[in-house]
Structure formats: structure tokens, C-alpha cells
């Protein structure tokens, strides 16, 4: 399927590109910079090692790719504080609170989430005060390290309701990346050097655990992958 790149305000910013699967759309943005948190964990010296932290507001790249020690690492880019920290997903809880409540509009455009008028919890594609702003990021990997894009696969979702990750285009049409109502695994690709945001919709309160795998091919031809689980508390 061919589609166009969109930015987080819905404007078209790029020429048509090709993705794996159901029209995954990604957008290039400049990542916020800052010193990197340091800690001695298996991910390498540039990933913060700490007790579990809860992220409930501000900018977070919930799915980020890095190369450390020749291995592909799935990390969380925590940009909610005064400096950027790269965290092991197992040490992070993403909190989606009451400010994220959203009533589905009339019409069929979002029927893959629920019925019109239904209340869901939504991390929006554009930043909203009081709601964590979750995206994904491949800006820390380059063609000097990898051949081609990074694979992004949803392996499993455990939780009290359904989850959908989608992007809204310039004319308001949704492009679904992942939908837990469908059979897993579900796969997409993310070009190198990308920072993107989308909508994350949850149909019920409770704790969700989303298991993803990032994969790529090194310049030497070695297949790389890393599987991690994101924890999100909704409601």
C-alpha cells in the first residue's frame, strides 16, 4: 500500500513511500535533545537503571530503537524531565489518566475502536496537557549501522479491553497501525531516522501489557531483534 508521510498536525510533508502491512504512516520530526541518563544495565551504559518510574505527562517515545554493543535495543525515551533518559521498558509504567477520556464521535471512521458515543481513553497524536504524549523513534539508528528499516511487530496484548494505535491524516481519515481486536502478530516497518506520534486508544480501565519486537539487519548482514513489554495503566 502507498501512502504519504504526515506530521503530527496532520499536514502532508513527504512524497509517497511504501510500508509493510496496513498503511502504516510515519513522520519525521526533530527529537528533543538533552543529556543522556546513565546507568549500568544490560542495555549498555546509556540506558538508565532505576526503580520503576511512572510517566503520566509530557513527551515519551514508548518504542525507541538504539544500537548498543552491536545489538539492537528496544528502549523507552523519557523526555518528561529536564533531560532525556533512555529506560528499560520493564522499569516504566505509562499512566493514562482521566484527562485522556474521549467520547468517540458519530460516524464509522473510528468504528474499529468502538461505537459512536462510547467513552475510551486516548493518548492523542498531538500533544494534550495532562496526558502523556507517546510516540516511536528510530533517530538513534542510521544506515551506518543497519541495512534498511526497523521492523515493529505487535506480538501480544493483555488487558481488560482492546487497544488500537492509529494515525489521523490531513483529511481526518485514520490509518491503523495495530489493533488488538485483530489476530497477532501484526507487523509494520519504521524507516531509519524517524520520530513519529499517533493515537493510542484503550476501551476499558485497567492495566495493559503490550509486547512488541523490534528487528533489523546489521550492515554485516546479521539479523537483530529485541522483544520487550510495555506496561500502561489506564483510567
Image: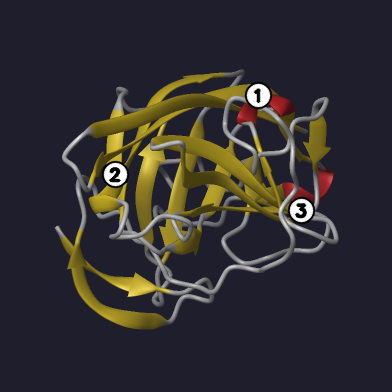
Residue at coordinates 73% horizontally, 38% vertically from top-left?
48
Q: Nearer the viewer, residue 37 or 82?
A: 37
Residue at coordinates 49% horizontally, 36% vertically from top-left?
74
Left or right position of 168 against 5: right
Q: Which residue is mark 2?
A: 188
- Residue 25 is marked as none
Q: Which residue is mark 1?
A: 90
Q: Position of residue 176 (x, y in %)?
A: 36, 49
Mark 2–mark 3 distance (CA, rounded to whole Å) = 26 Å
Secondary structure, mark 3, is: loop
Q: Which residue is mark 3?
A: 131
Left or right position of 132 against 164: right
Q: Position of residue 152 (x, y in %)?
A: 35, 40
Residue at coordinates 46% horizontally, 61% vertically from top-left?
139
Residue at coordinates 76% horizontally, 53% vertically from top-left?
131
Q: Quadrant of residue 42?
A: top right
Query: Mark 2, mark 3: which one is toward the viewer?
Result: 2
- Lower sequence index among marks 2 and 3: 3
- Lower sequence index among marks 1 and 3: 1
Query: Mark 1, mark 3: which one is toward the viewer?
Result: 1
Mark 2–mark 1 distance (CA, rounded to whole Å) = 23 Å
Q: Residues within 10 Å of mark 1 (few under 14, many from 20)?
A: some
Q: Nearer the viewer, residue 77 or 6?
A: 77
Q: Are marks 2 and 3 in contact (CB under 8 Å)?
A: no
Viewport quadrant of the C terminus: top right
Amino acid at each position: 500500500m502507498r501512502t504519504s508521510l504526515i506530521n503530527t498536525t496532520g499536514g502532508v510533508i513527504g512524497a509517497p513511500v511504501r510500508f509493510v502491512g496496513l498503511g502504516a504512516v510515519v513522520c519525521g520530526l526533530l527529537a528533543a535533545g538533552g543529556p543522556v541518563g546513565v546507568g549500568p544495565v544490560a542495555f549498555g551504559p546509556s540506558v538508565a537503571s532505576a526503580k520503576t518510574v511512572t510517566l503520566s505527562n509530557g513527551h515519551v517515545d514508548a518504542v525507541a530503537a538504539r544500537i548498543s554493543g552491536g545489538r539492537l535495543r528496544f528502549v523507552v525515551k523519557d523526555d518528561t524531565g529536564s533531560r532525556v533518559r533512555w529506560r528499560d521498558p520493564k522499569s516504566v509504567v505509562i499512566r493514562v489518566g482521566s484527562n485522556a477520556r474521549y467520547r468517540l464521535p458519530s460516524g464509522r471512521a473510528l468504528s474499529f475502536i468502538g461505537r459512536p458515543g462510547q467513552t475510551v481513553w486516548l493518548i492523542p497524536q498531538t500533544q494534550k496537557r495532562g496526558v502523556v504524549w507517546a510516540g516511536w523513534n528510530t533517530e538513534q539508528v542510521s544506515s551506518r549501522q543497519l541495512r534498511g528499516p526497523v521492523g515493529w511487530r505487535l506480538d501480544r496484548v493483555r488487558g481488560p479491553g482492546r487497544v488500537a494505535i492509529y494515525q489521523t491524516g490531513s483529511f481526518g481519515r485514520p490509518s491503523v497501525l495495530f489493533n488488538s481486536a485483530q489476530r497477532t502478530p501484526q507487523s509494520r516497518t519504521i524507516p531509519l531516522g524517524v520520530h513519529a506520534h499517533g493515537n493510542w486508544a484503550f476501551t476499558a480501565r485497567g492495566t495493559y501489557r503490550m509486547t512488541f519486537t523490534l528487528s533489523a539487519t546489521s550492515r554485516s548482514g546479521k539479523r537483530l531483534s529485541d522483544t520487550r513489554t510495555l506496561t500502561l495503566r489506564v483510567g
